[in-house]
Amino acid sequence: MKRLKAYFWPIVGLAAILFSVNALYHELRGLSVDEFIASFQAISLGSWLLAIGATLVAYAALAAYDKLALDHLGHHHISIWFITVCSFTTYALSHNFGASVFSGAVVRYRAYRSKGLTAGEVGVLVAFCSFTFTLGTLMLSAIVLLAKPDIIERFAEFLPIEMSLTTGVVILALVGLYVLGSLIGLRPIRTRWFQLHYPRSSIVFRQLVIAPVELLGAAGIIYFALPQTGNPGYVVILGIFLASFSAALLSHAPGGLGVLELVFIAALPEMDPADVLAALAIFRLLYLIVPFVMALVVILIYERSRFLAQRNGGMP
């Protein structure tokens, strides 16, 4: 049973990749490599700079997730520089490996334990950051569904537009209940290993502002890389990104390989598939590959410094 659990998520991720690649093959049978290269080369320098700026916004927001979680736990002594580096490394690795909650927990555990957090507090921090991401996804999904209710037809033509409006209202009502809980001041949940306190209202209101920013930035990378011809607009691109990124995370496929591309190609029939693939290639380069390489460098430097400190007797 333990062996089965160890291989379960890798098998799920592999199955998602194989299914997506097979579906993509049927979607892109008429696309040539030359067309893809031409679309990639057609992206202007200005679009590249905007996409890079959107990447920086996304990763800055992820650092704010960690800072908000630490404020919730009462750890105000940790420097913003350490938080930024730790957050960047965590997400750069977890976005590429899949099963981001688990792979991100390992990095955060090693880093924040060195700053005095208990194992239980690190667990709460990981859960808080995951919830902040979920909160941002829900809020933006509701806004997109209310602003562009016909977007639901891009994913399932048989679903009525009214369903978008109803779903958007229900999601915002749930967010409102979460805010209300902070204003009332619900009691903490105590277990044998840790205490789970409901976030203070000041934390919750900061969450509402910070939570969507990372997703807005990440979707902006793709939007800026797409050509204007046939482009349905940022709100629609944001909605498709929320659906594709959520599907990629749920699939546990490393980097959402194939899943992201499949959803985008299917949801943007009015655009040239080569242009969509070129934009997604830039997204993978800026949001996944470059941060991943940088994160490996950070880990090597950090582990080397810890090793030297231990050898010199400066660290337990």
Image (spheres, rainbow, N blue to C red):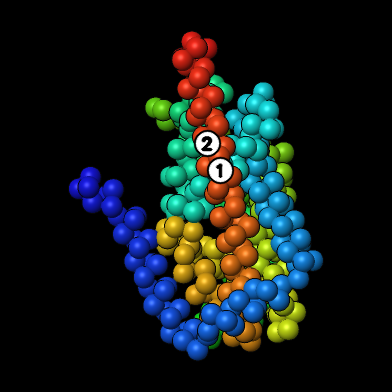
Residue 34 percent coordinates (x, y)? 57, 81
**Residue 289, above or below 299:** below
Relative height, residue 142 to residue 34 (above, below): above
- Please say if the residues under marks 2 and 1 sit with CB atoms less than 8 Å apart: yes
User: Is residue 307 shown left or right of residue 41?
Assistant: left
**Percent x, y of residue 250:** 45, 60
x%, y% of residue 145? 65, 72
Residue 103, disc = none
Q: Position of residue 195 (x, y in %)?
A: 49, 30
Q: Which residue is mark 1?
A: 295
Drawn side of residue 206 relative to residue 75, left or right: right
Q: Which residue is mark 2?
A: 299
230 relative to 188, above or below:
below
Q: Kindly tell me whether residue 275 is visible in this rendering.
A: no
- Residue 112 falls in which quadrant of the image? top right
Residue lying farthest top?
A: 313
- What amino acid is labelled 2 in the image? Ile
Question: Which quadrant of the structure image shows residue 80?
Answer: top right
Distance between the Cα atoms at labels 2 and 1?
6 Å
Q: Residue furthest right?
A: 46
Name the foreground residue: 41 vs 64: 41
Residue lying furthest bottom in this view?
30
Of residue 283 and residue 133, the one placed in the foreground of this image is: 283
**The residue under label 1 is which amino acid type?**
Ala
Q: Secondary structure at mark 1?
A: helix
* Residue 58 appears in the figure: yes
Nearest the viewer among 21 and 244 is 21
The residue lying at 53 percent from left, 80 percent from top is 33
Identify the residue at horizontal 45%, vertical 44% (top origin): 103
**Residue at the (64%, 31%) spot, across then down:** 82
Q: Please tell me whether mark 2 sits on a helix, a strand or a loop.
A: helix
Task: Please name the residue shown 47% across and 47% down the image.
Answer: 101
